[in-house]
Image (spheres, rainbow, N blue to C red):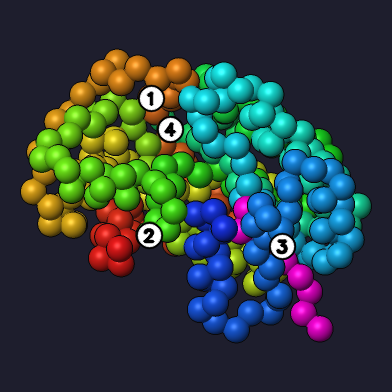
Amino acid sequence: MKRNIIVIGGNGQLGQCLNEVVSENERSFNYLFLSKTDLNFIDAESVKEIFKRFNPLYCINCAAYTAVDLAEDEPNSAFESNEFAVKRLAENCLAGNTTLIHLSTDFVFDGNSGVPLTEVMHAIPVNVYGLSKLKGEQEIQRIMDQYYIIRTSWLYSEKAGNFVKTMLKLSQSRDQLNVIYDQVGTPTYAMDLARVIIHIIENEIKAYGLYHYSNEGVASWYDFAKAVFEFAEIDMEVLPVTSSSFITKAKRPHYSVMDKTKIKAKMGIEIPYWRDSLNFCIQNI
């Protein structure tokens, strides 16, 4: 009988991508995708009941409070989902001998490094969302040993809402857009990330720890937008502007390019270049 793998946040962007990757081939495990309706992630008893019912070998946590600007006004909600619920999740994983795969973010950094971010660099968040995610990471690391924390950045896909789909939607009503050029990072195609996560599980890799994952290369949001319209063959004038042109409640890191040396070496994977993955995604939309 196949052991269970539970995916929390199963109907979100990454959850949907995981579901698609799982369905591509016969799998060694039984994957269960849990939506908010199936599991109230911040309710301790609901989480405990899910673990008792399914006795999962792995738990993939894609659930989080991700409203970056709103978190400045709702810090309690951000910390409840991103720290305290994660703490309880880690405790359930420890009790059930379940390996936890938890998704985190480049927003745990202040963006001042100017060099690719490694897993050993000191994390200094510049907003409530980033701090809440960092606190969740720290709870996992304090409580258990059998975990993968995967920090990622600028996630997009054919599914759910994201920057790529927003750009394509705006192109239907505008012929000119202002896009920030002084925030630099790397887009991550959620299908590529999903394949790495399933690779870890299906190959039962035991190299637990903290990892960085995005696609290869470097881009600003301006570069990202230009590439979207290039691959979609849409005639759009994109104007580069500074972050000061868009006043937001939450400060954003100006530099969040992540070093992927560790995950490539430990997992035996190759990571696609961001423009190649974006082109593939655009052709699929």
Disc 1 on helix, strand or loop? loop
Which residue is painted at 18% across and 57% down in the image? 232
* Secondary structure at numbered mark 4: loop
**Tag 4 and tag 1, C-beta contact below 8 Å:** no
Q: CA distance from mark 4 to mark 2?
A: 23 Å
| Circle 3 residue | 6
Q: Which residues are magenta?
A: 1-10
Residue type at tag 2:
Glu
Left or right, residue 274 beside residue 210: left
**Magenta residue check for 159:** no
Residue 60 visible? The answer is: no
Element type at mark 3:
strand
Mark 3 or mark 4: name the one nearer the start of the chain. Answer: 3
Q: Nearer the viewer, residue 40 or 244?
A: 40
Frontmost residue, 45 versus 19: 45
Q: Which residue is mark 2?
A: 158
Give above or below for 25 relative to 111: below
Count the marks: 4
Q: Quadrant of residue 221?
A: top left
For numbered disc 2, what is the local secondary structure?
A: loop
Of badges 4 and 2, the one in the foreground is 2
Residue 256 got which mark?
4
Measure the C-alpha gap from mark 3 to mark 4.
30 Å
Tell me whether the residue at label 1 lies in contact with that at label 2, contact meaning CB atoms closer than 8 angstroms.
Answer: no
